[in-house]
Image (cartoon, rainbow, N blue to C red):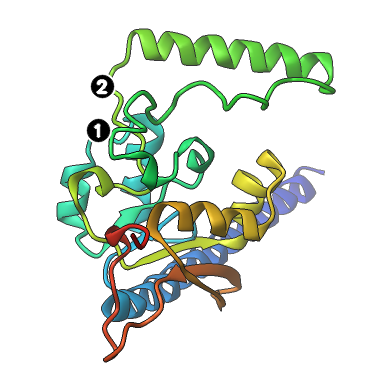
Amino acid sequence: MGVVALVVVVTSVAIHLTLRSRMIHDRLAAAAQTEARLGELGRQYGVVAFWGGVMNEAKFHFWGNYRYAQSYFDDELLAKFSGYSWLDLRDIRKLPPLNQGPNASASLSRGDASVPGEGTVGRPVWRRVLHGAYQWWLAMKQQRPVFPPQPLALYSGENRGIEVGLLAFPEDRAEVEVYRRFGWAEGDLKSKFESRVGPLRLWKERIAGIEWVFLAHQEEDGGARPSLAAGPPQ
């Protein structure tokens, strides 16, 4: 029995290590494909503001900065990863149209309490309890922040005049962060983007097995590609 048990343990460990190695290899390959394609589009359109996806260093640092530091290190990351910016897809509903004025979002910041209407109606008791605890935790964070909250923006650097040429995110992330959460459709999200930056062209591409959504301005006469920082047409 001891020999059988040893064989089972050794075999299980070997299978686990093989599967783990294969998973790491596949994720690195997917990250390389994603970065290569986004880099190609970046050379065509300019700075890419992205949310999520399988990426390496840039995604790791931008996500950590957004999730745990309230975007306090935007300037450092924008300098280090000059071809990228972080698209704030999760807080998109809180953003006012740009034509309300440059200070319209001054009272809001990343990490504010949930959007009105996101309450607990119809949820089971345990979900309501967790929601209440989470809202309490958010309130404590706002009262005693480790990092000063930054003004809400469509993407990292928008409030600093950084020009972005392309918005990009995986379609399944939009499903989780926007469509199911707010009851929006793809057209609603596109309209929200356009209220900030003007008319956009939307297309999709499959990269490393993931469906990506891209939005950019149409080419102007002569082939010039306007940046998304220009705002809606007057």
Compared with 8, 74 (above or below) is: above
Q: Are marks 2 and 1 in contact (CB under 8 Å)?
A: yes
Badge 2 amino acid:
Pro
Q: Specify which label sits upstream in the sequence, 2 or 1.
A: 1
Badge 1 amino acid:
Tyr
- Badge 2 marks a residue whose secondary structure is loop
Residue in the foreground of this view, choosing between 25 and 202 = 202
- Horizontal side of 190 relative to 153 (left or right) equals right
Residue at 41% across, 35% down: 67
Distance from disc 2 to disc 1, alpha carbons, whole Å, reads: 7 Å
Q: Where does residue 96 sit, x and y in percent of width and height?
A: 44, 39
Compared with 204, 105 (above or below) is: above
Compared with 84, 211 (above or below) is: below
The numbered disc on residue 72 is 1
Residue in the foreground of this view, choosing between 112 and 73 = 112
Residue at 50% across, 60% down: 169
In the picture of the structure, the residue carrying the numbered disc 2 is 148
Q: Residue furthest front?
A: 234
- Horizontal side of 109 relative to 174 (left or right) equals left
